[in-house]
Amino acid sequence: MRIGAILAVVGITVYVYSIREHVQEFAQYGYLGAFLIALIANATVILPAPGVAVIFAMGGLLNPLGVALAAGVGGAIGELTGYLAGYGGQAAVENTKMYNRILPWVQKYGAWVILVLAAVPNPFFDLAGIAAGIAKIPVWKFALACWIGQTIKMAMFAFAGAYSIDWIANLYN
């Protein structure tokens, strides 16, 4: 099962990285597009994929709360790849300095650390997901904390997009 989890994570990461240039095309599907963009952007492990910039723009076109909720669900589901990578066994990142700083926090505070790190834009969340999988935090706790944190983060971007477009429009009126 662990080997299957690792192979699934590697496969998903390679696939998402290969289609990263086409993520913006999902914006035409509205809230479903926000869900898919966040899912795809968060499904990669370690490799970056675009996402929040499109959520920012979509917040100016659609109801930003709807965008945040859809993207929060997609982001939380996408982050399960990091969790699976950790659950599948000791990941390749286990000897990195940042991972060694995050793992004790996850072991001590569990889902609360996941919630906070998911809510704050940072490049290290994959390491937290891996640590949660290694620490064997129940998947439902990880997913719930991740969903709340992702929704907060996506709301920040969607509302910033909504209000910045209004602000720019008012400059020219």
Image (cartoon, grey):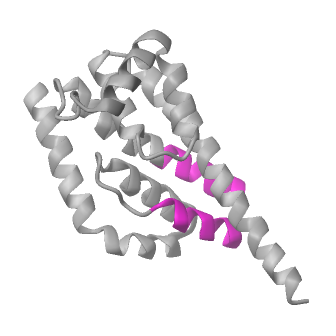
Asked whether residue 173 is drawn in magenta, I would say: no
Residues rendered magenta in the picture: 51-74
The C terminus appears in which quarter of the rendering?
A: bottom right
- Left or right of 136: which side holds 71? right
Horizontal arrangement in the rendering, residue 128 relative to residue 88 (left or right): right
72 up-or-down from 95: above or below: below
Furthest residue toward right: 173
Secondary structure mostly seen in magenta is helix
- Residue lying furthest bottom: 172
In the displayed structure, would residue 28 be above or below residue 72?
A: below
Residue 112 lies, in percent from the top left, at 55, 21
Give me the residue at 16% from left, 42% from top.
8
Q: Which quadrant of the view contains residue 167?
A: bottom right
Describe residue 69's horizontal placement relative to residue 123 as left or right.
right
Give the residue drawn at x 42%, y 19%.
Answer: 106
Q: Is residue 44 visible?
A: yes
Direction front: furthest residue: 97
Q: Quadrant of the N terminus?
A: top left
Query: Which residue is drawn at the image coordinates 71% and 61% (left, top)?
Result: 160
Q: Residue 168 occupies which quadrant of the picture?
A: bottom right
Residue 82, position in %: x, y?
31, 37
- Residue drawn at the location 51% of the way across and 71% of the way down: 27
In the rendering, at what x and y percent does residue 92 appear?
16, 34
